[in-house]
Amino acid sequence: MITGSEAESRALMMNAAVRIVAQYGFEGFTTKKWALEAGVAEGSLYYHFKSKSDLLNETFFMIDQEITALYADDEVIPEDPEELSAFVETLWGRCYHYLLGNPEKALFYHRFRTSPRYTEEIQRMQLEEYGTKMKVVFELMQRLNVKSMSIEKLLCCFIMDTTTSFAYRVVTGGITHSAKTEKEVACFVLQGMRSLFNSERS
């Protein structure tokens, strides 16, 4: 059982991992740098986590849980097609704004998802988490008659990959954030979703 104080310590340590990876990347992450950033003894990592990989995996899921917390179970999906499109864009915008508002976490999250650390097992666990905590997304898929688990998986991966990729480019200065560029990214995501819906129906 993890106590409140231990949970706080783990959160502080995971946030230190976020800052190290944001600054140096995974290739520059060392337990020595991490310990200095966290203000703890290097050996304390193994008291709270099984290994360095365990620390980094749990840090990824900490960010993922913050994203899933943006979505409530009692959200009502509109019936009107035009309202539905705006609703989907709003759902997407929550994740995008979260990433832009937390640039170090956006860097960590994108780098993790595009690294060998993002294994099939991690992806499976992540999608299970989405199914439990982002019910509105999966209810939306059912409303749109997306019945294939493979398409559900593709949709979730497409949305998160595209969103994190653009957020990463904004955070690193590759593109400038504006209402116009945000709308363009939203349209790109929605168009990609529609193409996947169409492939499910054909």
Image (cartoon, rainbow, N blue to C red):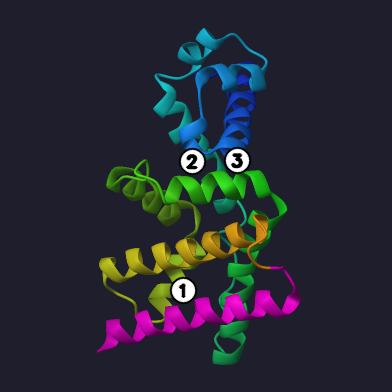
Check disc 3 and report the residue beneath it: 22
Badges 2 and 1: C-beta atoms under 8 Å apart? no
The three-letter amino acid code for the residue at tag 3 is Ala
Q: Which SS class for mark 2? A: helix
Residue carrying label 1: 140
Q: Earlier in the sequence, mark 2 or mark 1?
A: 2
Q: Which residues are magenta?
A: 176-202
Alpha carbon separation for disc pair 2 and 1: 23 Å
Say which mark, if any, is on residue 61: 2
Above or below for 55 versus 195: above
Q: Residue 155: within the magenta? A: no
In the rendered structure, the answer to whether residue 107 lies left or right of residue 199 reads right
Task: Tell me which numbered mark, 3 or 2, is placed earlier along the sequence.
Answer: 3
Alpha carbon distance from label 3 to label 2:
16 Å
Q: CA distance from mark 3 to mark 1?
A: 33 Å
Rendered image quadrant of residue 116: top left
State which quarter of the image contains the C terminus.
Answer: bottom left
In front: label 2 or label 1: 2
Q: Is residue 194 magenta?
A: yes
**In front: mark 3 or mark 1?**
3
Kind of element beneath mark 1: helix
Q: In this orientation, does residue 35 appear?
A: yes
Secondary structure at numbered mark 3:
helix
